[in-house]
Image (cartoon, grey):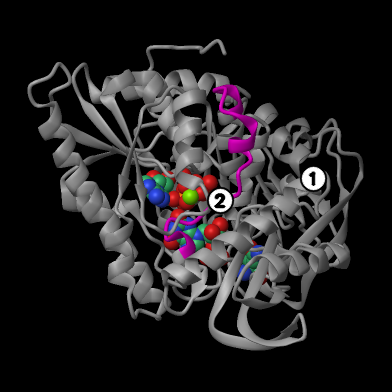
Amino acid sequence: MAINEKTATEPPNKTFDTILVLDFGSQYSHLITRRLRELNVYSELLPCTAKVLELSWKPKGIILSGGPYAIYEKGAPTVDPAVFELDVPILGICYGLQAIAWHFAGNVVAGEKREYGHAKLDVKQHEGVAVHVDRLFSGLGSELEVWMSHGDKLSHLPQSFLTIATTFNAPFAGIAHETKPYFGIQFHPEVTHTPRGTELLRNFAVNICEARQHWTMDEFVGKEIARIRDLVGKKGQVIGAVSGGVDSTVAAKITHEAIGDRFHAVLVNNGLLRHNEVEEVQKTLTESLGIQLTVVDASQRFLDQLIGVVDPEQKRKIIGRNFIEVFQETAKKMEEEAKNSSKAGDIEWLLQGTLYPDVIESIAFRGPSQTIKTHHNVGGLPAVMGLKLIEPLRECFKDEVRELGMKLGIPENLVWRHPFPGPGLGVRVIGEVTESQLRIVRQADKIFLDAIQNAGLYTSISQAFAAILGGVRAVGVVGDQRSYEQCIVLRAVVSKDFMTAEAYCFPMDFVRDVATTICNEVRGVSRVFYDATSKPPGTIELE
Ligand SMILES: Nc1ncnc2c1ncn2[C@@H]1O[C@H](COP(=O)(O)OP(=O)(O)OP(=O)(O)O)[C@@H](O)[C@H]1O
Ligand SMILES: O=c1[nH]c(=O)c2[nH+]cn([C@@H]3O[C@H](COP(=O)(O)O)[C@@H](O)[C@H]3O)c2[nH]1
Ligand SMILES: NC(=O)CC[C@H](N)C(=O)O
Ligand SMILES: [Mg+2]
């Protein structure tokens, strides 16, 4: 591809026109950012407490998100008056509208009825009176289907505001300032239940804020390569934890483009990888991407430490700790080996494939969510090793990473590869992880995945795998003999962001055929179950 390489070394919010989303704690806040990115408008999310006047960059416009609070109650977050000093357009969504009204001394009260779900919105034009207020709904007609989720509402308009939309239940479903570009809407344009919501967001971001739609992966990659070069300098060395997953592969490819063989990709074989995984990852990285991959075989050490461990959290912690130790030792060893060669130098940097959802999770107004599982986390590495982080994808969502992967010439099958967790099969063997359990789960997983590939279903499914219910046995009959063997669980889910997921609905004969093949071909299995649980209440992995 032709990389548009500029000398910019600034983060994206300095080089791309940016819409700032201030988060008041709604579960949809990140979707506002997503929708804007889909319009090729760059957007970032910060908590509503962010000090906007102290930012090192200036947004083209600000969106105030929804939130679970009642603005008239003590302790509810309010809009920082500083946002009105920036002199940029502002759009309040749901709680955001209520916060704007509150700021301008409009009254917000608890409604008699909660309004939750679809509503018909009537748009009010102000042609000839105050033309600019019509811009938010421009081109959207006079009647819109919208999605509501609120209990509170404005009881009267703040001074100098006009009503631009109403619903049966909400007389002030849309408001706009008479002279300034301040807007508020009671409904949620960011959810798909508001069919023309993205067009409304385009009206705001592109027409009203005049943000350029130049956030494209072509632009981004060139700038990111230049930024990494600048950051690492002429001599710096980078070690990269590479799993063969799309995130770390794309991050590795960008870093390799930037600094060539001063980037050292490392795959740790923790003994918990799938059938042929090491060979496949090595082949792809070396042959297709021209990246030299060092495979560190640490499988015995991981498996030894997992002996007798059945608690999922304990397993995750052991695996995480060993990852850190193996990395530490590998970085030292690489420095030592290169000592007297032309490649000599300290390894000061660690590459990670962190994505924007991880960043949002840690900065959103409600803060990091409760720990359901300890995710093995390379994020623990730098503090221990004194390494500085390079995270080329920390501003990107998964679908942007995939687009980037395609642009960088990464093979399609890798770009669309299902995610595979760092703790690997360790969390897919329920109970104690042993060599024999790993053998069974590897074989069953391969049969299931091959069947999915052969049926052409791989890309319709977000993630699929087999797990084994250690400690559970069931009776079967094979060739007139009684068997008393183990149980395999098949799991396949469809998910956009892996925060929620639905079980994939296979035709029953597909599941039956896979079950038959597994029982016939994998020694030690007498039953196969299909996991039909959604997330929530389940999670994607079983442990
Ligand atoms: N076996 C491994 N060897 C080296 N690094 C690993 C290994 N497993 C995981 N990692 C590191 O942990 C990070 C997080 O893993 P995660 O599975 O979330 O991302 P990924 O593997 O890059 O992509 P995907 O989500 O598509 O699997 C990876 O980006 C990689 O840096
Ligand atoms: O790198 C990872 N380290 C982990 O410790 C880990 N645990 C779960 N996952 C993956 O995250 C997604 C959501 O999984 P859960 O619903 O099981 O939490 C799914 O895609 C899981 O495969 C992990 N990935
Ligand atoms: N979704 C929201 O932002 C809700 C705002 C406010 N808590 C209400 O119920 O009206
Ligand atoms: Mg992975």
Q: Position of residue 126 (x, y in %)?
A: 83, 38
- Distance Cα–Cα, label 2 vs label 1: 18 Å
Asked whether 495 or 527 is in front, the reply is: 527
Q: Dot 1 corresponds to which residue?
A: 456
466 to 163, vertically: above or below: below
Relative placement, left or right, of 405 versus 116 is: left
The segment highlighted magenta reads: 406-425
* Mark 1 surroundings: few (<14), some (14-19) or many (≥20) residues within 10 A: few
Give the residue type at disc 2: Pro
Q: Dot 2 corresponds to which residue?
A: 419
Task: Verify whether residue 412 appears in magenta.
Answer: yes
Whether the residue under disc 2 has CB within 8 Å of ligand 1:
yes
* Mark 2 surroundings: few (<14), some (14-19) or many (≥20) residues within 10 A: some
**Residue drawn at x 47%, y 73% as measured from the top left:** 372
Asked whether 148 or 256 is in front, the reply is: 256
Disc 2 element = loop
Instruction: Look at the image and tell me whether residue 203 can be seen.
Output: yes
Majority secondary structure of magenta residues: loop
Of discs 2 and 1, which sits in the foreground?
1
165 to 337, vertically: above or below: below
Q: Position of residue 92 (x, y in %)?
A: 62, 50
Instruction: Look at the image and tell me whether residue 154 can be seen.
Output: no
Asked whether 307 or 483 is in front, the reply is: 483
Disc 1 element = loop
